[in-house]
Amino acid sequence: MEDKQYMEYVHTHAQKSSHVTTLIWAFAVGGFICCIGQAFADIFGAVLPNWEKSKIAALVSMIMIFLGSFLTAIGVYDKIGVHAGGGSIVPITGFANSVVSPAMEFNKEGIVLGMMAKMFVVAGPIIVAGTVSSVVTGFIYWIVGLF
């Protein structure tokens, strides 16, 4: 199939979606996930008043990663993603989903060559881009600090 024929095929068979509805769902679900994280932070802040904010933030991050991984494992997070789109990807739970999904998918190929080798197929480029950009930014700040 040529590119033009393929694009015609896609346009005739693709399901039409409303951009406004998609944006509203993404905003609502992403905001709801963030509200859950904030609720955990507020609860832990009240229950553990002597803890530093950084420790509470780390605890909330661990809980949100666990929830994203757990919901992915039982098949709920993918259903949320169908309606929420980018709203389910942006928070920390979306990152957990992007690691757990390939690990589950390739688990049947074995632990080492399947799960461990493929678990960062989706999240790996994001980690590399973040690491490289932080090194470049740090290097620029170091050079600017010399002058």
Image (cartoon, rainbow, N blue to C red):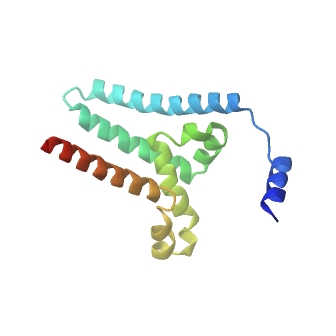
x 42%, y 41%: residue:
64
* In-front residue for pair 126/33: 126
Please count the marks in the image: 0
Q: Residue 82 falls in which quadrant of the image?
A: top right
x 28%, y 35%: residue:
56
Relative to 139, say whether 41 is above or below: above
* In-front residue for pair 50/137: 137
Relative to 101, say whether 78 is above or below: above
Q: Residue furthest front?
A: 147
Horizontal side, residue 18 vs residue 134: left or right:
right
Q: Residue furthest left?
A: 146
* In-front residue for pair 48/53: 53
Name the quarter where the N terminus is drawn.
Answer: bottom right
Q: Residue 57 falls in which quadrant of the image?
A: top left
Tell me where residue 22 appears, x and y as whole percent. 67, 33
Tell me where residue 13 appears, x and y as whole percent. 84, 50
Horizontal side, residue 38 vs residue 31: left or right:
left
Relative to 123, say whether 147 is above or below: above
Name the quarter where the C terminus is drawn.
Answer: top left
x 50%, y 33%: residue:
33
Tell me where residue 58 appears, x and y as whole percent. 30, 41
Tell me where residue 20 appears, x and y as whole percent. 69, 28
Horizontal side, residue 19 vs residue 119: left or right:
right
x 46%, y 31%: residue:
34
